[in-house]
Image (cartoon, coloured by chain):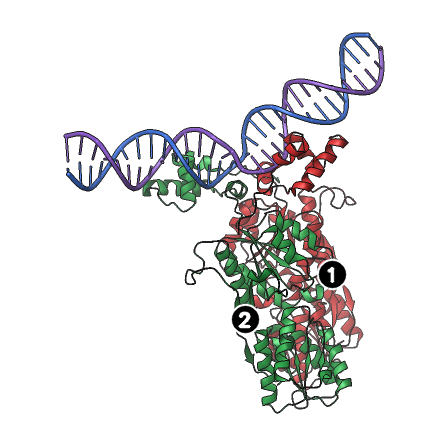
Chain colours: A green, B red, C purple, D blue
DNA sequence: GCGGCCCCTGTGAGCGCTCTCACCTCCCCG
DNA sequence: CGGGGAGGTGAGAGCGCTCACAGGGGCCGC
């Protein structure tokens, strides 16, 4: 019951089509340089036999796997539940699928799980890797570099040394943050607070930098570090209200955090946006559209970023047919952000 | 730059350890039946050379891949962003990792994408499949059965014919729904509405059945079909308020829907839970804890369900070391639900 | 009308591993 | 002290595929 009928081999296809294994192979792999009648015969044999190439056998000789690992280096389940990852995955999946590559998902489950992932990548089971959510102290980049696996990072990696050739896709976090603050000041707000993300991630650090660009001489107490979670946003907001009850705007480092902040503001009797304007970051729809009031936020095209990461990696891997428009060596991409105005600011 | 130094082969390990390839292989695969000094020698050689077995070569002869496909048959990006999937994935990943299996993620991107996935599964690239979010008319189960790939479904599959031996993991949707309604009636509510999920999914249908079990002779206008999304919840709630402005409770088929309903209720000036009590389903934390007021909901242990699915599949695949406690053929599992009381009901 | 060349096809050698089977050593028992 | 057996080890085949390379036609040019 469990055992399938043995799958047909290339040999079988060749026999049925009355050609050699080599010719059958050529047809299966595109059919260049094979004359038409033979191509047709082989195609028909493939069809009739339901032939599917044995990827293992193929990989064994080509040393290619047509598979890419996606590594999510985020041990916290709560954070992983951020729709952010789902959207990126979707973008990645689309692009990989379009080029017949498989997606091997590697979740880092705990603090000490990096070694396992490193070993897997070093094992040459995949052609390349897409890595997310790196923290500054993460050992993964080292392991990856050592393993020599072509990699594209999601978000600018934090280290400044050696790895300078690292490929990544990011959005312009700093300018996005500036835009948010600019919007707030445009609204006449002057006491603008910032709830950061975890500052060991460049996305959070860059957003803070953007905020500072605009608020150079603001009260430092207007900045509270947080962790990209709603609960963290609540805590941070309480802290802020305690420090500066007179604040009139909050720029949160992501939408989840903003949602938490919103709740605390309401609790405290403040009206949003009348008393305090709030801006988030990401424009994760299920969150940003569903808060009360709906969130004004800095949008980044998350799915597109995923797609770009995959495309970059495939080009790096020399995959033909990928992005013929862009010639030369692939290079990192920083996408612009756009401010999406809803009701909260 | 891209090319790695050629990876050492078993041959190299054997040579260095001064044994035959066969012995080296035995050690690498557990070392049973090899005498201690040799085991140590080979282990050391492996270490020194940084040897990692070539999975392709291994699969070629064993016909095993130690890889499992996870298929998410949900073309709608919005729905996919439900933290539900992320949590299941996490559970699955944990279990697979613990047994050295890889997770190949297959997202169905659009209406006509099933064929691709079917082909992949039939291609024998993975040992088994975990399939989610099936709709009644989904061609996938047929393709899978035809391909003969061992499969475990997430949620009871809808077809009643032929496939009866299908393995699945689900929670007790019907009893969970009953419990929700029971709680509401216990609160003295009598005009209890139900916002369903997409009724071509058994989870949604079962929850509706549970609701009906308790509300046999309720006004049919108290039931509105929806789609598990917040926006759908909003629409359904508006419809409901129009039909029966006097309703005093709502049981929503999932938390996302409940969140949408909550918003519309607030808009309409109703107080929750004083005027209208609301209960959700799932207990997806980022949603249920963050609504205003926090959501009373029927909890299912999503991550555990993922873990169980993986475990079931691995047992089905005859993976040694999995669930020794449970003997005999693996069978489907239905987990109990628990009511989590928060503020909304 | 014939030689040369190009295009197409087939042959054969592995890719790195596991697995069967034969062999060899050592131990135990009669 | 010799024979049988068990327990270890090694040799060799072959998984299904791709990729040189060799060879065989047909066609063009002179």
Spatial separation of the CA atoms under disc 2 and disc 1: 32 Å
Closer to the camera in the image, B233 or A332: A332
Marks 2/1 same chain:
no
The quadrant holding residue B297 is: bottom right
Residue at screen point 63% across, 78% down: A280
Q: Does residue D8 sit above or below A213 in this rendering?
A: above
Closer to the camera in the image, B275 or D1: D1
Q: Does residue B341 sit above or below C5 in this rendering?
A: below
Residue at screen point 56% across, 43% down: B6
**Can residue A233 be seen here?**
yes
Residue identified by numbered label 2 = A301
Residue occupying the far front of the picture: A161
The quadrant holding residue B85 is: bottom right
Q: Which of marks 2 and 1 is in front?
A: 2
Q: Dot 2: few (<14), some (14–19), or many (≥20) neighbours within 10 Å? A: some
**Can residue B332 be seen here?**
no
Q: Dot 1: few (<14), some (14–19), or many (≥20) neighbours within 10 Å? A: some
Helix, strand or loop for disc 2: loop
Closer to the camera in the image, C9 or B335: C9
Q: Where is residue A214 in the image (x, y as percent from the top left)?
A: 61, 84
Q: Position of residue B57 (x, y in %)?
A: 58, 39
Left or right of A109, for residue A23: left
Residue identified by numbered label 1 = B301
Q: Position of residue A242 (x, y in %)?
A: 78, 85
How many labels sit on residues? 2
Circles 2 and 1 in contact, beta carbons < 8 Å: no
Badge 2 sits on which subunit? A
Badge 1 sits on which subunit? B
Residue at screen point 58% across, 83% down: A342
């Amino acid at each position: 019951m469990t055992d399938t009928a043995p799958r047909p081999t290339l040999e079988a296809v060749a026999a049925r089509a009355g050609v050699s294994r080599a010719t059958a192979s050529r047809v299966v792999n595109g059919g260049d340089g094979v004359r038409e009648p033979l191509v047709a015969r082989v195609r028909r044999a493939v069809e009739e036999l339901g032939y599917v190439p044995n990827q293992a056998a193929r990989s064994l000789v080509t040393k290619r796997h047509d598979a890419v690992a996606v590594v999510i280096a985020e041990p916290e389940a709560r954070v992983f539940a951020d729709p952010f990852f789902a959207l990126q995955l979707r973008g990645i999946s689309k692009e990989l699928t379009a080029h017949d590559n498989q997606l091997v998902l590697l979740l880092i489950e705990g603090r000490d799980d990096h070694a396992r992932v490193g070993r897997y990548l070093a094992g040459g089971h995949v052609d390349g890797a897409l890595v997310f959510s790196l923290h500054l102290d993460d050992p993964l980049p080292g392991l990856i570099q050592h393993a020599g696996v072509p990699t594209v990072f999601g978000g600018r990696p934090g280290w400044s040394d050696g790895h300078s050739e690292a490929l990544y896709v990011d959005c312009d976090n700093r300018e996005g943050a500036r835009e948010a603050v600019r919007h707030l000041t445009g609204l006449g707000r002057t006491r603008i607070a910032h709830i950061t993300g975890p500052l060991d991630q460049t996305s959070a650090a860059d957003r803070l930098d953007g905020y500072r660009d605009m608020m150079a001489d603001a009260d430092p107490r207007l900045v509270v570090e947080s962790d990209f979670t709603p609960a963290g946003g609540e805590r941070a907001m309480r802290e802020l209200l305690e420090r500066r009850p007179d604040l009139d705007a909050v720029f949160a480092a992501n939408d989840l955090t903003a949602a938490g902040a919103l709740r605390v503001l309401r609790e405290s009797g403040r009206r949003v946006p009348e008393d305090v304007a709030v801006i988030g970051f990401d424009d994760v729809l299920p969150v940003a559209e569903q808060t009360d009031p709906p969130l004004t936020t800095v949008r980044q095209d998350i799915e597109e970023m995923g797609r770009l990461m995959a495309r970059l990696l495939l080009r790096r891997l020399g995959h033909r047919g990928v992005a013929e428009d862009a010639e030369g060596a692939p290079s990192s991409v920083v996408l612009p952000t756009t401010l999406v105005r809803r009701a909260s600011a």
